[in-house]
């Protein structure tokens, strides 16, 4: 059957039309023990285990930020972040992979042409898709679209992907900036270069490289890769879907997807530290349970306050994101780049709090917690990997926020 003869419905009903944000968050929290239990195996295979992904899919996690027209729930950023926070408490790498496989549905809903959205969300709305934003390949124009070639590393969320999205450059049109393309996963090759200790942390995040060789992508499954410099007018998707969720702001959204797993690693470290305090005694007399000793109590209390503050920042930003988007949709008053970048900077502060908490707990847990296979070691490694991410440069972002505020040219992507 040719592509032109495939019948597409005008809209796709969500699997559970009466599902509420409260229920979907509760589902995520209920899965924490199971997420913890599979963490070692997930590190080994480079992604969370298949049975868990089936449960994520059935619970509706991949549809939280998807347009209602295409079988999504469009609950909002605040609900999505609470779900990912719960998953991250179970395993940071699993949360990273789930989040970056699920939170790119708004990118399609915001920026891609309507015909492309109909094509990409398909007949059932089953959409799981990484987005590698750094342009690493080429899209060569041909009749009706582009021929895409290249290899993209760190394609987080590709472990169970149905599609692959990436930024490319068009030869001869580099000055126009990147072109974003999206194609079904069967058109690309996912390379076996992730997991099992290939990198220090987030081994379970499904961040494999992807190779694309001479793949035709129709014009309507592409869009400009410049998603951040819109000023007075929101992304086309806000008007297409009549929904503020698709206003197009991504600084806070993309960075929260990296930081929530780091907060989850800190929460996991706190959980492990509590078990240590409850089950181990002091080395020297008086030999008493560690939880009764001020030194150990202090480490627990300090770390817990940092984690609580980090989570409060995420919750505040999630609520603020939706309030600003809804105001833009309702009144036309823009949700500005400065607003978005300010939340990006706030989320970076949350990351530093979480890393400080993890470091404190790791140092107080004794050397047995640093052994290979120890959960505390995994939390420490998962937190550490964030420090090398290009988006973690809080000094750079803070400067760019100030430049925006004072009306100076900025260099933020």
Image (cartoon, grey):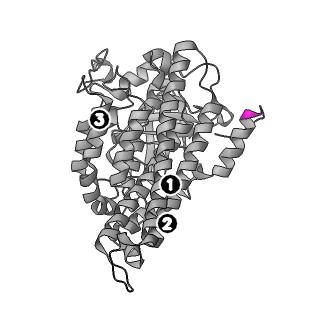
Left or right position of 70 against 232: left
The answer to whether residue 132 is seen in the rendering is no
Q: Is residue 222 above or below residue 305?
A: above
| Number of numbered discs visible in the structure rendering | 3
Residue at 36% x, 71% y: name it: 292
Left or right position of 271 against 34: right
The quadrant in which residue 9 appears is top left
* Residue with the mark numbered 3: 24
The magenta stretch spans residue 383: no
Mark 3 → mark 2, Cα distance in angstroms: 32 Å
In the foreground, 89 or 364: 364
- Crowdedness of circle 1 by 10 Å Cα count: few (<14), some, many (20+)? many
Residue at 70% x, 41% y: name it: 400
* Residue with the mark numbered 1: 306
Q: Which residues are magenta?
A: 405-413
The quadrant in which residue 201 appears is bottom left
Q: Nearer the viewer, mark 1 or mark 3?
A: 1
Mark 1 → mark 3, Cα distance in angstroms: 26 Å
* Residue with the mark numbered 2: 360
Q: Main secondary structure of the magenta part?
A: loop
* Image spot of residue 184 (x, y percent): 36, 36
Left or right position of 22 against 213: left
Pointer 1 and pointer 2: residues touching (CB < 8 Å)? yes
Quadrant that contains the N terminus: top left
- Crowdedness of circle 2 by 10 Å Cα count: few (<14), some, many (20+)? some
In the foreground, 272 or 150: 272
Q: Nearer the viewer, mark 3 or mark 2?
A: 2
Residue at 38% x, 24% y: name it: 67
> Which mark is first along the chain, 2 or 3?
3
Q: In what element is the residue under mark 3?
A: helix
């Amino acid at each position: 059957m040719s592509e032109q003869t495939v019948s597409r419905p005008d809209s796709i009903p969500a699997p559970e039309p009466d599902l509420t944000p409260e229920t979907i968050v509760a589902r995520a929290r209920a899965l924490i023990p199971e997420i913890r239990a599979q963490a070692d195996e997930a590190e080994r295979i480079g992604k969370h285990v298949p049975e868990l992904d089936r449960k994520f899919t059935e619970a509706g996690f991949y549809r939280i930020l998807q347009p209602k027209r295409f079988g999504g729930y469009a609950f909002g950023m605040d609900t999505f972040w609470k779900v990912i926070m719960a998953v991250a408490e179970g395993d940071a790498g699993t949360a990273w992979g789930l989040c970056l496989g699920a939170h790119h549905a708004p990118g399609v809903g915001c920026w891609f042409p309507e015909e492309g959205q109909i094509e990409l969300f398909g007949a059932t709305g089953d959409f799981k898709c990484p987005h590698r934003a750094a342009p690493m390949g080429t899209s060569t124009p041909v009749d009706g679209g582009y021929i895409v070639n290249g290899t993209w590393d760190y394609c987080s969320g590709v472990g169970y992907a149905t599609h692959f999205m990436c930024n490319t450059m068009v030869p001869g049109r580099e000055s126009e900036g990147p072109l974003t393309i999206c194609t079904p996963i069967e058109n690309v090759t996912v390379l076996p270069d992730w997991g099992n200790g290939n990198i220090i942390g987030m081994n379970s995040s499904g961040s494999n490289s992807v190779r694309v060789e001479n793949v035709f992508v129709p014009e309507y499954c592409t869009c400009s890769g410049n998603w951040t410099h819109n000023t007075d007018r929101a992304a086309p998707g806000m008007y297409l879907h009549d929904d503020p969720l698709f206003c197009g702001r991504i600084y806070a959204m993309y960075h929260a997807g990296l930081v929530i797993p780091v907060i989850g690693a800190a929460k996991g470290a706190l959980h492990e530290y509590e078990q240590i305090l409850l089950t181990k005694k002091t080395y020297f007399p008086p030999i008493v349970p560690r939880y009764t000793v001020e030194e150990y109590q202090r480490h627990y209390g300090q770390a817990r306050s940092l984690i609580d503050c980090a989570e409060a920042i995420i919750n505040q930003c999630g609520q603020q994101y939706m309030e600003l988007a809804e105001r833009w949709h309702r009144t036309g008053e823009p949700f500005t780049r400065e607003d978005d970048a300010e939340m990006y900077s706030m989320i970076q502060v949350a990351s530093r709090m979480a890393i400080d908490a993890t470091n404190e707990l790791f140092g107080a847990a004794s050397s047995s917690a640093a052994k290979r296979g120890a959960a505390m070691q995994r939390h420490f490694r998962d937190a550490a990997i964030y420090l090398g991410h290009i988006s973690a440069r809080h000094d750079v972002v803070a400067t760019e926020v100030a430049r925006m505020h004072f009306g100076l040219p900025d260099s933020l992507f």
